[in-house]
Image: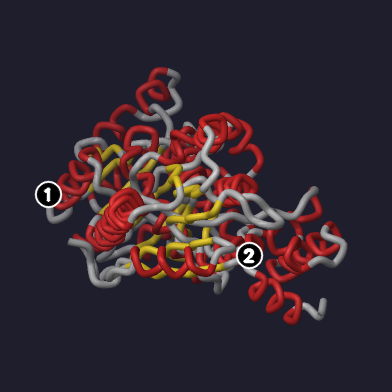
Amino acid sequence: MAPAHSSVSLVIIDDNPGSLEFLSSALARDQVNIFTASDSEEGLDLVYTHRPQIVLTDLVMPGLTGLNVLERVIDFDPAIDVVLMTAHYSSDTAVEAIRKGAADYLNKPISLNVVRERVGRLIDIALRRQQIMNVDHELLRTARFDDIIGRSPLMWEMFSRIRRVAPHYRAALITGETGTGKDLVAHSLHKLSRPLGRYVVLNCSAVVETLFESELFGHMRGAFTGADRDKAGLAEHADQGTLFLDEIGDMPLGTQAKLLRVLQNQEVQRIGSLTPRKVDIRVIAATNKELRQAIARKEFREDLYYRLSMVEIRVPSLAERMEDLNLLTQHFVKKFSGQYEKQISGLTRRAQIVLSRHPWPGNVRELENVIGHACMMAMGDVIDVADLPEHLRRSSGVEAVSSDEVSSEGPAYAMASQPAQGEAGAHLSFEEHEKHLVKSALEGAAGNQSEAARQLRIGRDALRYKMKKYGLL
């Protein structure tokens, strides 16, 4: 049974008022919102405005034909099921309609039982999709470990390992590719072990080698040129808390030796001091390098590696946990739609297909950047292929996304929009970018607001609101 807030929208387009009344009455039921239009252009505006799951359209109408409507709807969102109706049946037309993506083809006069059975089946499928989407939203709420999103077996295994080692470790090593979220794992370890202590971070790849020891262990006044006062290092600052050493593979060998003594003795000796200072710290190191290979090249101390790797947590790549892709995508859509103050509900199914085909060499960080870009580019309330970065569309072979792939059952998200063209668009603010899109669409449509709205894939009311907002009326 679908949740109370699940609903399906249905648009009926027919120039015969009697057919509109009959179909509306026949398909009326709980959880179904029905919108009708006696003109094909008005019907398309309803589609762009309400983004229905199902469209019923007559084949022969003044102006745009049913096949024209079918093409526009499929171009807008292939996830929408379009049913064609006609009193002038021909097998050639039926084949053409199915080839162009129609979900069904009904002959007029349509009996009450036929319309309820055939269209009712599509409504039931759409409601099931809503159920799946609601389940995904609930999973996003529950599939969270601290600030980490995941429900795949590899992630649950990692979560379990973090819980087990958090109360006991003194030193830990987090490994994984760039962009997998090693910093989030480190922070989770800290919060589970020393929530009241300081969490001190040092990015080893960002520190000048000559200043490394001073930064980490501190120095005494006069210890070297420029040391005009005593300074506590980050290790002292982390006393009673956690020291996170990111990219530890870039730490100089001399500093590695002193870090090993800190781990063994829980003591820090400032540069220029003869007296060690006792500290109580936990050390978490992270790296995307193969430290065993670095040891073989004499670039990393073997004894430090074994000290750190007594507790090792490996963070899986995104390619290894693709079952988490939809959850992560929802998380970032929610994050960036709030940041940009936009109402974006998700992705079209064809955009999801593009994401699922991408190998994600940059892992979760790359996905975050892609969704952030797409949320900024989207004109409507959902993200479509056109909103994704160009390199992603090109590398994923977006032109090969088939209507069969798009129309298969699964989580459904709706929308479409066009990005600004050219490199200059990348440097525009969100408002400047949106104004540019609206102005370009109006110019391309020679001032025809209905055509401009279709180009932008938004309703005419939404277009007029944006025109007023940017002084284009």
Q: Which residue does the image show at 66% across and 41% down from the upper left?
A: 390
Q: Is residue 188 above or below residue 431?
A: above
Q: Is residue 190 visible?
A: no
Residue type, numbered disc 2: Asp
Spot occupied by residue 260 in the image (x, y as percentages of width and height) = 31, 41
Q: Which of these two is toward me, 303 or 415?
A: 415
Q: Which residue is mark 1?
A: 164
Spot occupied by residue 171 in the image (x, y as percentages of width and height) = 24, 46
Q: Which of these two is toward me, 331 or 192?
A: 331
Q: Which residue does the image show at 37% across and 46% down from the upper left?
A: 182
As helix, strand or loop, the secondary structure at mark 2 comes to loop
Q: Which residue does the image show at 68% across and 79% down from the upper left?
A: 465
Spot occupied by residue 290 in the image (x, y as percentages of width and height) = 39, 27
Q: Are marks 2 and 1 in contact (CB under 8 Å)?
A: no
Q: Which residue is mark 2?
A: 39
The image quadrant that residue 227 belongs to is bottom right
Spot occupied by residue 317 in the image (x, y as percentages of width and height) = 37, 36
Q: Dot 1: within a 10 Å radius of its alpha carbon, few (fewer than 14), some, or many (20 or more) residues?
A: few
Q: Earlier in the sequence, mark 2 or mark 1?
A: 2
